[in-house]
Image (spheres, rainbow, N blue to C red):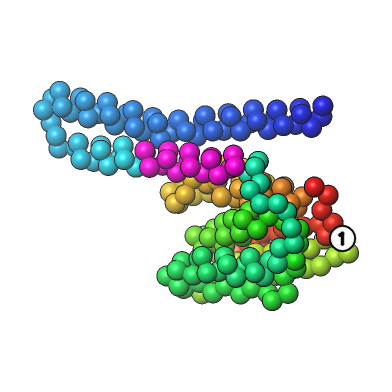
Amino acid sequence: MAELARKNEELERFTYTVSHDLKAPLHTIQGFAQEIQESIAENDYSHVSDYLSRIQNGARRMGEMLQDLIKLARLGHVANAFGPISLNNTLAEVQDAVAGLLSTHHVALDVSPSLPTIQGCSIRLHELFQNLIENAIKFRLRDGSARIEVGVEESPTKWSVFVKDNGIGVAPAHQKTIFGLFQKLNPKSEGSGIGLSLVSRIAQMHKAQVNIESAGEGRGCTFWLHFPKEIVL
């Protein structure tokens, strides 16, 4: 019953967040559609092109949010059974997938050869690490040599895998909310703001804890994923 209550509370928060955040692009579309109607009525077409561009951007934004919500919903249906997954193989695949971004933005990616093999879902773990690395690329410092490091620390009960960057960092005030749905520290940045929420959900699927460490803005950050050595599914 306690678990059911927790799920209902999570669903309520999820529904509120989705309905709230989808209103912004919808209001944009409605508002500028009204502006176009008024411009046509006044036979003034000087701003119509700009209004249409804003409507298109609002529709694109809403489409991205809905597509990412579908991804989030699908996490409840694991396509592949859990099995032994080499994180070094996973990171090699991710590195191939983001090779273009790394090259274009001159970002160095250093992956430890000693990452563990854990029980998990290969598709979801690929999504998790690709989201973290793309996040680090997006929020790199523009005036320095961008670096991303993936490594691991071992304890008797867990593997603590980290993704560390020397990017713009995260202020302490935002470090507890950064994994929330549609959370964007920079409203003008690309994407829907759902990437780190996906990371958190995939970590939960693997009974892993996720957290962020950052000394503050401009000081880089480290995402930690603490995978238990013995997973009880």
Left or right: 5 as drawn, with respect to 93: right
Question: Type of residue at label 1?
Answer: Thr
Q: Residue furthest right?
A: 156
Give me the residue at 52% from left, 29% from top: 19
Image coords of residue 30 (percent x, y): 33, 28
Q: In which quarter of the image is residue 121?
A: bottom right
Q: Residue furthest left?
A: 43
Q: Which quadrant would the N terminus be assigned to in this image?
A: top right
Magenta segment: does it hold 20?
Answer: no
In the structure shown, which secondary structural element does the residue marked by tag 1 occupy?
loop
* For residue 210, above or below residue 4: below
Main SS type for the magenta part? Answer: helix
Magenta segment: does it hold 65?
Answer: yes
Residue 14 in sight from this viewpoint: yes
Image coords of residue 230 (percent x, y): 84, 56
Which sits in the foreground, 149 or 171?
A: 149
Give me the residue at 15% from left, 27% from top: 40
Left or right: 88 as drawn, with respect to 20: right
| Range covered by the magenta-colored residues | 59-74
Residue 164 in sight from this viewpoint: no
Give me the residue at 17% from left, 28% from top: 39
Image coords of residue 28 (percent x, y): 36, 33
Q: How crowded is mark 1: few (under 14 residues within 10 Å), some or many (20 or more)?
A: few
* For residue 193, above or below residue 31: below
Left or right: 84 as drawn, with respect to 60: right
Image coords of residue 35 (percent x, y): 25, 28
**Residue marked by disc 1:** 157
